[in-house]
Image (cartoon, rainbow, N blue to C red):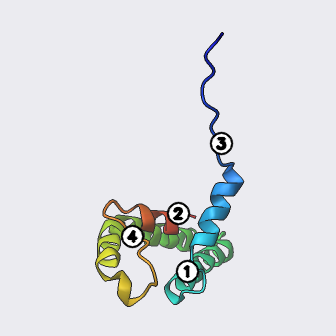
Amino acid sequence: MTHQPPQFQTASSYEMVMGFVHAVDWSEPWLLAVVGGHVAVALAALTSRSSQVGQASIYVLALGIVYSMERINKWAADNWASFASQNYFDANGAGWSAVQGW
């Protein structure tokens, strides 16, 4: 008789993404502002695609935000109750990076 390993149920990528989507309260004002910021940057990138200065400005802005992420995340982790219904921020910055990364 051969030994069979236990069967594990793994969530599909779709199930994991949908779990994240359902766990977040997308009606929170700060999160809507972040989504709006992403839309604004995308529109700025599209409208300035023939302008080297415009594209460079967007790039420098993005670099500044990435450079500041650790500080922003620390502040958000310390003050989340003043603007969010749940704490999306951890000491390592994973929460804020996830928000900014998509």
Foreground mark, 2 or 4? 4
Image quadrant where one finds the N terminus: top right
Look at mark 3 in the image and give the residue it sits on.
9
For marks 1 and 3, give the CA distance. 38 Å
Q: Is residue 51 visible?
A: no
Give how far across and how far down residue 43 sits, in percent.
Answer: 66, 77
Please give the label number shown on residue 89. 4
Q: CA distance from mark 2 to mark 4?
A: 14 Å
Which residue is label 1 attached to? 37
Please name whichever residue, 25 or 97, is drawn nearer the observer in this view of the structure.
Answer: 25
For residue 101, the mark is 2
Give whichever of discs 1 and 3 has the lower sequence position. Answer: 3
Distance CA(mark 1)–CA(mark 2): 12 Å
The image position of residue 31, as x and y in percent, is 53, 81
Q: Is residue 29 visible?
A: yes
- SS of the residue under disc 3: loop
Mark 1 is surrounded, within 10 Å at the Cα level, by few (under 14), some (14 to 19) or many (20 or more) other residues, namely few
Q: Residues within 10 Å of mark 2 (few under 14, many from 20)?
A: few
Amino acid on which disc 3 is placed? Gln
SS assignment at label 4: loop
- Helix, strand or loop at mark 1: helix
Choose top left, top right, bottom left or bottom right for residue 84.
bottom left
Q: Which amino acid, mark 2?
A: Gly
Name the residue rendered at 67%, 77% in the picture.
47
Q: Amino acid at mark 1?
A: Gly
Q: Dot 3, how many residues are within 10 Å of its Cα: few (below 14), some (14-19), or many (20+)?
A: few
Query: Does label 2 or label 4 sit earlier along the sequence?
Result: 4
Sequence-first disc among 3 and 4: 3
- Say which residue appears at 56% left-offset and 69% top-offset: 55
Foreground tag (3 vs 4): 3
